[in-house]
Image (tube, grey):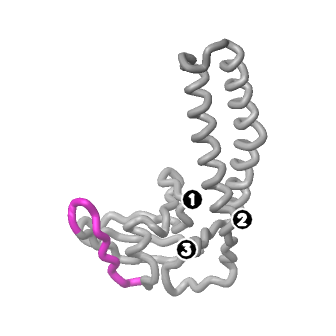
Amino acid sequence: MSKINYFTEEGLRKLKAEVKQLESVERPRISNQIAEARDKGDLSENAEYDAAKEAQGMLEARIAKLKAQLSNARIIDDSKMDNSKVLILSKVTIKNVKNGMTVQYTLVADGEADVKQKKISIDSPIGQGLLGKAVGEIAPVQTPGGIMEFEVVEISR
């Protein structure tokens, strides 16, 4: 059974747009490159042809992967979610127990993670450590440098 992929409406829209872009713009562009390279003669020593065929294979693999994600996509309705504990789409303020630094993250599905926008994946080590925690609870997170502890300070939407 395939893994269900959770998305916000915006994230699902972006994924669909990317698939459309790859299929309607990138696929024809690569097909043209292959045709042009084929017109240049002997394919056995044609580096342009080999490169275009490789790019085509990578593109088709990317399209297949995105379509698989779409086929198992579910939109998250955050209006019915509980704010008493950390869940997907929670905006959570955490404090590093060791140094007292606080930071706020929004937990999102893996495909929507963007550290610059302070959106972290629920599949990341921090996301996994925070899931299910309530305000005041300590979340131990395994990092390459050892276990770090974060206190959940606030949860909102």
Residue 86 position, x and y percent, is 49, 79
Q: Which residues are magenta?
A: 135-146
**Amino acid type for the residue under numbered disc 2:** Glu
First in sequence: mark 3 or mark 2? Answer: 2
Q: Secondary structure at mark 3?
A: loop
Query: Nearest the camera: 136 or 1?
Result: 1
Question: Looking at the picture, which amino acid does disc 3 mark?
Answer: Ile
Q: Nearer the viewer, residue 48 or 123?
A: 48
Image mark for residue 103: none
* Residue 128 against residue 31 in the figure, above or below: below
- SS class, disc 1: helix
Q: Are marks 1 and 2 in contact (CB under 8 Å)?
A: no
Q: Label 3, on which residue?
A: 88
In the picture of the structure, the residue carrying the numbered disc 1 is: 111
Query: Is residue 145 inside the magenta stretch?
Result: yes
Mark 1–mark 2 distance (CA, rounded to whole Å): 13 Å
Residue under numbered circle 2: 9
Q: Which quarter of the figure is the N terminus placed in?
A: bottom right
**Placement of 131 over or under 23, stated as above or below:** below
